[in-house]
Image (spheres, grey):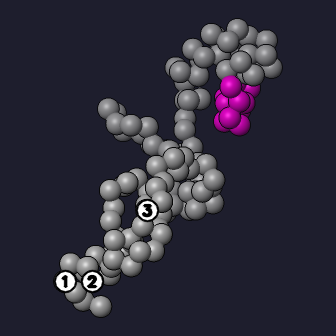
Amino acid sequence: MNNEQKQSIQDLRSQGKSYRQIADHTGLSMNTVKSFCRRSDAQRRLCKNCGKLLADKAKCKPKTFCCNQCRQEWWRANDDQMNKSATYSLICANCDEKFESYGNKNRKFCSRGCYFANRYGVP
């Protein structure tokens, strides 16, 4: 593998191309491309929101975002990609209003105000 091919692999990998796509483009085998990427800095990961280079820590889960602000911005912009299969429709035990609960099917009240009103008789 010559320096031109190495540079091409790094450029294509930074564009998000797969090992197969890079192998087809450069004419090298997919295993050669994969080995080079794993050994070199071509395996670097970028923030999903801003594209900043991420520094992963050893023995930790690989990061997806560089900071909490980027994570929140990305999820606000890509709310449709969230798996919301744990959403439950329930009826409040205090005001009998229908409400949605995410992740907790045992909720009894739609808000803290209804909880306090039911428990302590506070309006």
- Residue position for label 1: 120
Establish if 69 lies above or below 1: below
The residue positioned 46% from the left and 49% from the top of the image is 86
Q: Are marks 1 and 3 in contact (CB under 8 Å)?
A: no
Task: Report the magenta stretch's main SS.
Answer: helix
Disc 3 crowd, CA 10 A, few/some/many (<14, 14-19, 20+): some
Numbered badge on residue 84: none
Q: Are marks 1 and 2 in contact (CB under 8 Å)?
A: yes
- Name the foreground residue: 12 vs 83: 83
Find residue 63 and report its image quarter.
Answer: top left
Separation (CA) of disc 1 from disc 2 = 6 Å
The residue positioned 62% from the left and 10% from the top of the image is 31
Label 1 sits on a secondary structure element that is helix
Amino acid type at mark 3: Leu
Q: Residue 2 at x, y = what percent?
A: 71, 14
Answer with mark 2 or mark 3, whichever residue precedes in sequence.
Answer: 3
Separation (CA) of disc 2 from disc 3 = 18 Å
Numbered badge on residue 117: 2
Amino acid type at mark 1: Tyr
Establish if 113 lies above or below 3: below
- Name the foreground residue: 8 vs 64: 64
The N terminus is located in which quarter? top right
Amino acid type at mark 2: Ala
Answer with mark 1 or mark 3, whichever residue precedes in sequence.
Answer: 3
The residue positioned 67% from the left and 30% from the top of the image is 13
- Name the foreground residue: 119 vs 59: 119
**Residue numbers of the magenta segment:** 4-18
- Residue position for label 3: 90
Disc 1 crowd, CA 10 A, few/some/many (<14, 14-19, 20+): few
